[in-house]
Image: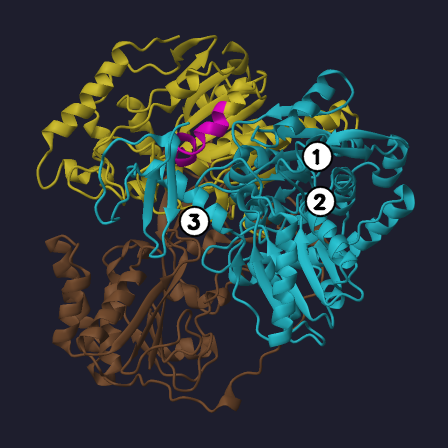
Chain colours: A brown, B yellow, C cyan
């Protein structure tokens, strides 16, 4: 059984990606099980999708803990430990990553020896969250890497799953996806299904008897204010607002009022300050700033910088 | 109006330190969250928000809460009944001297348009009938947002939703929640929007000095549900007001008075064009029938509007 | 220490009054209304320092009850059948909030078809919710159990809402002698409510009942609620012992009557348990070794006590006044799971379903149940579950059906229904040996 796990952000078409790959396997005569998994279903937020494909009946279900192929559609997720990109990797797992960095870079960063295949990001829109075609491209590449799906079958699957798109969009998606498929020909079949392991190779289970806790802590209540400050939603951001203080005229702090996430406060000198740990990059401040003093800049990954957020979703 | 106008004279009077914490899982650019963060600044932390199921339920998810004050999740139909219980209990505690007056809190119900227009009507009606002293904030994004933008009682005519996908969109009409609530003769009732922060702050400030049931509806542009780029949320909100789609008004002493007047109303198309949920009214061809229907209804509404 | 005649509803109201409930959100439903009417009068007359609020529905009522409880006041409310079900979402919710309060449920059969009379399907629908359940058999029991319930719900080791169940009509509207305990003693027994950290006040921010993402934290919270419910077994025993010392009446989690040397045991719950007691008395006079096990606590389920009480008994007849459609009697099912694999578990565990919708269980049915159990003990074969229903009752139903379905006066072949008019006062319906319904006209005088 092939087990493939997608990592992406809301808005990048991860659900569609799993459906494209699932349908492609299905058209090749496989039994298939595919599903997305949402944390908070929001644009920019990390999400997962899973595909299982086998010639046998598929009995397992739910999250994929032992993937044969891990697809990372947005490499900023690889820097967030809780996004769980390297969970369950073993020696045979292949990683496919959309990134400007090299395979060696990521092997070092993630501290793994796995085969990593890089898909270069095509830069048409600067904001990576506005690229729903990423999902289709990843699915197409994965189809080739599996060695089980022909180009024509992939095209069929793409057409089937993207039938809702307008003609122009559909054509673009097809072109990009089929190109991605072709670009993987050198690695065709490199993804292999894991063989069944002997029982004693599974990690031991450690059951406990849950201890009785008093209601003062075992009720679902939070006895503290503002613990959300520990949740760094800044990791959702694909575009960053940067204030040009030369242009800022300290108007009536429109940016501070309009920011839905309370990310902009005004300091003692009357200058607005953005909390980048929380800023989701909605860009309302950029659009509304009266003297146009805020610029929208694409988030770049900073080499060597590990994101230390404590909150996230795990697969 | 003049009292709160003294407190919030101009935009610079609005708070610049914000009470509601960041780090919540609301969509980037959420018009509802924008309104709530503005409201919370005016209300202050001596509040307990009583919530019904909807997008904002996710504001507090264990162990993260953005509130400096208190929060209480109840159920989809009964947040106002929860408010009844909390308000009565606080009154009893103060009356029986188990807490001091300084320990008392203001009770604020927070629900979406789904709960408010639908199953929440029974419990809301009950609280107004019983003259409960509380504030009800409804964030209206015109659909059941948290579940994927299905049609709700707040969905407007012609809008596409995930359960109204045909080329006509939703063929029904938006419920007039304001009138339903007004018919109960509450102590205060108003419409607000995050893109008009001064109007919003004045109205919320006013509610702090009124006893009895006070209800406000905050129009909440929703990038995810209405299908537009999050950065346009304020622009969409301003257009809702400028085209007359979202009248800003108050019900006070039995009269409905509008608080923002347009010199000249923009055609409703200017607003509709900004959102993907109305795309089918323009592409591949214009649906003149629906567009005219929408414009006519808005025109008709404004014929009888009264201003301060 | 004199007694007065009180209805079950009256006793329930007295329980709330003595416990000094602060807040009563209310919504009327037969057969509970007398409870809230009584409380209302006391409040208006100044006999009870309490606030009552008329809510718009039971769902709202339960929400307000739980909300007030987690704000920090002592709450009482009451409902029945349809109202309990309408509120069902909030039963689970308030238990999950760990809201401490007491609710009286006046047991009534569930629609459809709609009835006003008693059985236990309503209260049993709540058995998974997290609410604890105390089942009363007499009016004194109701008052006393309400006081015990307040100690139980507010105990920091428990903090779960409690239902005190009383059967509609058979207890709710029936007067029995009740001793109303002295208020000073009750104050010593219950004391004021200490909400600990479950409250809403300024300067102590708290976010209560928040959402949870992920199966692991959810599992934790739900399971802790279960552990608290189980802890309630030992807490209940402590409280019941204290109550016995203070007030002289004993309320163990299960009551056994003449069980020690019994061969056959009835298992019952609620007001009809006293009928079973009377049957035991008469059977004992006739030389039969019979006993009764009566549940008082149903949640938490006192499995060990029950298992111990039934050890080495030859046969058990569970009389369920409820039915789980598609499975059978709920108490029977739960008892089977408690006894399975236990040393000395009775060989025969028979299921009887009676009393649905308030149907009486006359004493001769208890006698016949014992006959059945004795026969089963001899053969070693447990009989199939039986609905207590007689041939006379079947006749009665057929008569009603004939009217409802307008079957005419002459003998008919049931494959052709004539629409001739019918004189309903004189219809006599019998079931012949082929199970065909035929009617004959009787003379009118």
Q: Which residue is mark 1?
A: C8
In the displayed structure image, the side of residue A22 where residue C319 appears, left or right: right
- Of residues C33 and B195, which is closer to you in this image? C33
Quarter occupied by the C terminus of chain C: top left
Q: Chain of mark 3?
A: A
Residue stretch rendered in magenta on the structure: B113-125
Which of pointers 2 and 3 indicates the residue nearer the eye?
Answer: 2
Whether residue A252 is visible to the viewer of this picture, yes or no, is no
Cα distance, mark 2 to mark 3? 58 Å
For the residues tagged 2 and 3, is the chain the same?
Answer: no
Task: Give the number of marks.
Answer: 3
**In the current view of this chain or complex, which residue is farthest to the left?**
B285
Badge 1 and badge 3 both on one subunit: no
Which residue does the numbered mark 2 point to in the structure image? Answer: C136
Label 3 sits on residue = A280
Q: Nearer the viewer, residue A15 or A56?
A: A56
Give the crowd class for mark 2: few <14, some 14-19, many >=20 residues within 10 Å.
many
Task: Say which quarter of the image contains residue C37.
Answer: top right
**Is residue A148 found left or right of C163 in the rendered image?**
left
Residue C396 screen position, x and y as percent: 45, 42
Residue nearer the viewer, B130 or A66 = B130
Q: Are marks 1 and 3 in contact (CB under 8 Å)?
A: no
Magenta span contains residue B114: yes
């Amino acid at each position: 059984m092939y087990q493939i796990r997608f990592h992406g952000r809301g808005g990048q078409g991860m659900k569609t990606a799993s459906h494209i790959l699932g349908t492609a396997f299905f058209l090749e005569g496989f039994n298939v099980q595919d599903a997305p998994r949402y944390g908070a279903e929001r644009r920019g937020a990390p999400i997962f999708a899973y595909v299982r494909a086998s010639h046998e009946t598929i009995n397992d279900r739910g999250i994929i803990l032992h993937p044969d192929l891990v697809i990372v559609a947005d490499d900023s997720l690889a820097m967030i430990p809780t996004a769980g990109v390297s969970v369950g990797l073993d020696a045979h797992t292949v990683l496919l990553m959309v990134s400007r960095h090299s395979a060696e870079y990521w092997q070092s960063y993630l501290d793994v020896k796995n085969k990593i295949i890089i898909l270069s990001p095509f830069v048409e829109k600067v904001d990576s969250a506005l690229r729903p075609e990423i999902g289709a491209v990843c699915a197409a590449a994965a189809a080739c890497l599996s060695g089980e799906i022909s180009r024509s079958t992939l095209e069929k699957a793409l057409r089937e799953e993207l039938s809702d798109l307008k003609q122009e969009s559909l054509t673009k998606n097809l072109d990009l996806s089929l190109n991605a498929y072709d670009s993987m020909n050198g690695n065709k079949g490199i993804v292999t299904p894991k063989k069944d392991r002997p029982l004693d190779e599974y990690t031991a289970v450690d059951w406990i008897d849950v201890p009785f806790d008093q209601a003062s802590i075992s009720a679902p209540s939070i006895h503290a204010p503002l613990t959300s400050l520990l949740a760094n939603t800044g990791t959702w951001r694909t575009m960053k607002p940067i204030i040009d203080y030369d242009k800022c005229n300290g108007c009536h702090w429109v940016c501070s009022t309009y920011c839905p996430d309370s990310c902009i406060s005004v300091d003692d000198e009357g200058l607005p300050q953005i909390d980048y740990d929380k800023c989701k990059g909605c860009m309302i401040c950029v659009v509304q700033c009266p003297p146009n003093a805020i610029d929208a800049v694409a988030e770049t990954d900073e080499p060597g910088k590990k994101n230390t957020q404590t909150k996230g979703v795990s697969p | 109006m003049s009292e709160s106008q003294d407190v919030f004279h101009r935009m610079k009077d609005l708070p610049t330190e914000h009470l509601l914490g960041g780090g919540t899982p609301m969509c980037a650019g959420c018009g509802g969250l924008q309104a709530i963060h503005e409201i919370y600044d005016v209300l202050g932390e001596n509040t307990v928000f009583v919530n019904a199921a909807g997008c904002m339920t996710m504001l507090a998810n264990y162990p993260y809460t953005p509130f400096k004050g208190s929060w209480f999740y109840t159920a989809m139909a009964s947040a106002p009944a929860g408010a009844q219980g909390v308000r009565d209990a606080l009154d009893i505690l103060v009356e029986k001297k188990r807490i001091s007056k300084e320990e008392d809190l203001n009770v604020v119900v927070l629900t979406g348009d789904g709960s408010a227009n639908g199953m929440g009507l029974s419990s809301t009606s009950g609280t107004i009938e019983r003259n409960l002293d509380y504030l009800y904030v409804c964030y209206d994004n015109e659909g059941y947002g948290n579940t994927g933008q299905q049609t709700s009682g707040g969905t407007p005519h012609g809008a596409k939703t995930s359960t109204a996908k045909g080329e006509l969109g939703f063929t029904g009409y938006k419920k007039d929640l304001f009138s339903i609530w007004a018919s109960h003769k509450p102590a205060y009732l108003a419409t607000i929007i995050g893109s008009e922060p001064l109007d919003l702050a004045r109205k919320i400030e006013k509610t702090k000095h009124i006893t009895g049931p006070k209800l406000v509806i905050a129009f909440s542009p929703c990038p995810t549900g209405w299908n537009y780029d999050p950065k346009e949320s304020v622009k969409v909100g301003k257009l809702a007001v400028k085209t007359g789609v979202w009248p800003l008004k108050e019900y006070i002493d039995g009269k409905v008075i509008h608080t923002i007047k347009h010199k000249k109303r923009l055609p409703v198309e200017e607003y509709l064009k900004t959102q993907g949920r109305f795309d089918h009214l323009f592409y591949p061809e214009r649906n003149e029938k629906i567009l005219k229907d929408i414009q006519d209804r808005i025109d008709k509404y404004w014929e009888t509007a009264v201003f301060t | 220490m004199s007694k007065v005649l009180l209805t079950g509803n009256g006793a329930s109201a007295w329980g709330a009054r003595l416990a000094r409930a602060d807040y009563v959100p209310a919504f009327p439903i037969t057969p509970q209304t007398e409870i809230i009417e009584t409380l209302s009068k006391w409040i208006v007359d100044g006999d009870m320092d309490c606030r009552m609020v008329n809510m718009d529905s039971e769902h709202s009522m339960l929400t307000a009850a739980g909300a007030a409880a987690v704000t920090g006041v002592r709450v009482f409310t009451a409902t029945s059948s349809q109202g309990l079900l309408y509120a069902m979402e909030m039963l689970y919710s308030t238990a999950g909030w760990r809201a401490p309060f007491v609710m009286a449920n006046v047991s009534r059969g569930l629609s459809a078809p709609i009835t006003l009379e008693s059985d236990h399907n309503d209260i049993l629908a709540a058995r998974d919710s997290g609410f604890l359940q105390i089942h009363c058999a007499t009016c004194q029991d109701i008052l006393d159990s309400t006081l015990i319930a307040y100690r139980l719900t507010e105990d920091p080791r428990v903090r779960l809402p409690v239902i005190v169940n009383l059967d509609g009509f058979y207890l709710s509207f029936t007067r029995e002698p009740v001793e109303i305990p002295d208020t000073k003693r009750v104050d010593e027994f219950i004391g004021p409510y200490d909400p600990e950290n479950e409250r809403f006040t300024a300067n102590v921010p708290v976010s209560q009942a928040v959402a949870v993402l992920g199966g692991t934290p959810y599992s934790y919270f739900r399971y802790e609620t279960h552990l608290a419910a189980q802890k309630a077994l030992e807490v209940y025993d402590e409280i019941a012992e204290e109550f016995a010392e203070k007030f002289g009446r004993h309320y163990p989690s299960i009551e056994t009557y003449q069980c020690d040397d019994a061969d056959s045991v009835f298992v019952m719950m609620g007001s009809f348990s006293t009928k079973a007691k009377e049957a035991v008395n008469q059977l004992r006079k006739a030389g039969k070794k019979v006993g009764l096990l009566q549940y008082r606590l149903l949640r938490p389920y006192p499995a060990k006590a029950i298992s111990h009480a039934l050890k080495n008994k030859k046969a058990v007849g569970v009389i369920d006044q409820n039915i789980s459609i598609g499975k059978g009697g709920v108490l029977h099912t739960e008892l089977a799971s408690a006894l399975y694999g236990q040393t000395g578990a009775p060989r025969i565990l028979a299921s009887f379903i009676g009393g649905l919708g308030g149907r009486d269980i006359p004493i001769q049915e208890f006698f016949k149940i014992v006959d059945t159990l004795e026969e089963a003990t001899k053969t070693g074969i447990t009989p199939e579950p039986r609905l207590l229903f007689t041939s006379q009752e079947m006749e009665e139903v057929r008569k009603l059906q004939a009217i409802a379905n307008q079957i005419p006066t002459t003998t008919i072949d049931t494959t052709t229904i004539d629409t001739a008019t019918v004189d309903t006062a004189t219809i006599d319906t019998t079931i012949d040996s082929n199970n065909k319904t035929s009617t004959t006209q009787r003379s009118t005088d």
